[in-house]
Image (tube, grey):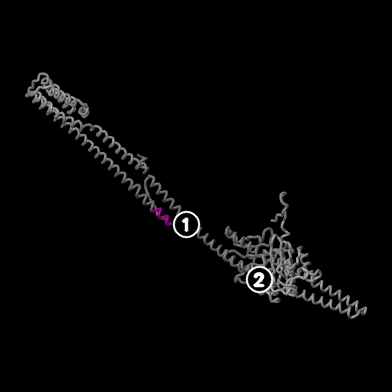
Amino acid sequence: MKLLQRSLVARIVASLLAISAMALVSIVVTMAVAGGSRGDAAAINVAGSLRMNTYQIVAALQRFERRPTWEHQTEIRVLKERFEERLTGDNLTGAIPTSEAHELRRQYRLILSRWHNELAPEVNRAITSQYLQAEPLNLALDGLVGDIDTMVKQLEQNTEAKIRLLSALQILFLGLTAVVVAIALYDIRHNLVAPLRQLMVLAREAARRNFSRRTRLTGSDELAMLGRTFDNMADQLASSYADLEERVARKTEELERGNQAMQVMHDGSRSLYGGGNDLCASAAPMLRRIEQLLEIGPIRLSLNDPYDDRQIPILATHSARRPTYCRDHDCHACLLDSEPLTLPDTEEGDCLLLPVSVGDEMLGTLEIWYPKGEQLSDSVRRLLNALADQLATAVYLQRRIEEEQQISLMNERTIIARELHDSLAQSLSYLKMQVARLERMQAKDAPKATQAAVFDELRTGLNSAYRQLRELLTTFRLKLEGPGLQSALQQTTAEFAERMGAPVELHYDVPPHLLNPNEEIHVLQVAREALSNTHKHAEAHWAAVTVRFHNARILLRIEDDGIGLTAGDSPPMHYGLVIMRDRAHTLGGELHLANRVQGGTLIELEFTPQTARLITRQPAPDVTTHDQGN
């Protein structure tokens, strides 16, 4: 009983078991009653046929009395045997109770006695003596028929009693089942449905973030315990949700500040990376805005001096005075705060020192002050680390840009000096030798005809030097106005197309940044010298310049449709061709001159770029002997 009081499941199971047990008992009783009624209808039919068979025996006896033939005698004997067979057969005796006290059993005994003692002897006597006494036979017949009618009536009453018993049992079990179902439904409604509704309401309200709903279920069954558990869970969820909302609000505020700080850093990166080396004007506004968003500060940036290994303060937010190393006194980026702070005023706070570095190279430090006792969150620390990395990247890039500018300037100066030495300086040296030769001739009073030849040499040398100077000026103007060899060649071909009055095509197919500045100057000068010769001597109506990269080598081709070379080759002492061969030798390449099959001149310069020479070549396998380059 205690289990049924404590467990709703046990009560439901008990109800189902009770209903199942009553249904099973009802089925068993029904089957038993139905089994007991099996054969009752056959017995009634057999009992009714006994009555008919009795009349048939009497009618056969009467016919035998009128005509005592063997056929009538045989018919009487067959009818008698049939009567006895039906009277003692299983169809009839199986439906009669075995109890001797039962009325149906006594009635059956009475019919047997009347047949064997009264009617059967008369039938036998009539058959053997062929003499029929009508009066005793009719009396026996009426008594036997009356007894058979009584037995049939008793059989019918017995069957009806079984049916009434079966109906009563069905009604009884149905009533008991209805009572059990009613009790189970009442228990389910009050102890299952109603608590489930309350639990559903609690769950729905909890899904709506309303944790004030309570079930307040009483009892000791499962749903009552579940309701009390849900009530406790709602209390805990209400407390946890309130705490979680507070934490989410703080986290959301922190994320919003972080996003705003990231946006400030993103917006400040443009001025930071494009502001040159003026970190005050580019970084100070960004640092002040980050201080306001993250509620920290002041911030001081110091950079390492690469020459004397000391740190130099570059800028400090909330500064009350101009930094010591300020270079622009017209700039007020550090002095825009209405309430400036000095770093000594922050001694009561805590300081976060972050390195401003790129890789292993230490560029400086970033001091970040914040109120004492407070802890910087991980997200704020990540933002500050990103800020330090951004400042480090800006400083590093600016230093690299300055170094690249210095290297580019030195390369340009070296190229200009070499070009002047290889062209104009040699021409001036040649003119100086001719001047010295002329002085010696004048000292010896040489004839004017001899001196005139020297003057012609001087004039030719001056013209050549002037032409080389103009070519150099043109070349370096092209280099300065358009960076890259392709741009310079485009200007060159356009210039000579205008001078020649004929089209000059350019076909350029070289990967970017493949040639160094020295190689670009040599290629450009060879192309200009070749186009200059075409303009002066070729009488061409078309020219083309082709530069392409193939099989790790650069091929420069200048061709025209002019008159071509007279002997199929160039004069060995031609000054311009000598310079082109010298440039080809400097590049480590080869220069070829020949006449085109279609007519005109073809000049080809082929060399391996300096960058291609830097490719590491490894020995090939024993099967083949070709080079492999990475």
Place of residue 493 in the rendered image (x, y in percent of width and height, measured from the top left) = 69, 72
Question: Which quadrant is home to the N terminus?
Answer: top left
Does 125 sit left or right of 336 as displayed? left
Q: Which residue position holds label 2? A: 321
The residue lying toward the viewer, choosing from 526 and 156, is 526
The residue lying toward the viewer, choosing from 276 and 472, is 472
Does 612 sit left or right of 18 as displayed? right
Place of residue 114 in the rendered image (x, y in percent of width and height, measured from the top left) = 13, 24
Question: Which quadrant is home to the C terminus?
Answer: bottom right
Q: Which residues are magenta?
A: 201-209
Which sits earlier in the primary sequence, circle 2 or circle 1? Answer: 1
- Kindly identify the residue that appears in the image at 86 percent across and 74 percent down: 433
The residue lying toward the viewer, choosing from 67 and 413, is 67
- Secondary element type, mark 2: loop
Q: Residues within 10 Å of mark 2 (few under 14, many from 20)?
A: few
427 up-or-down from 223: above or below: below
Residue 561, image quadrant: bottom right
Q: Which residue position holds label 1? A: 242
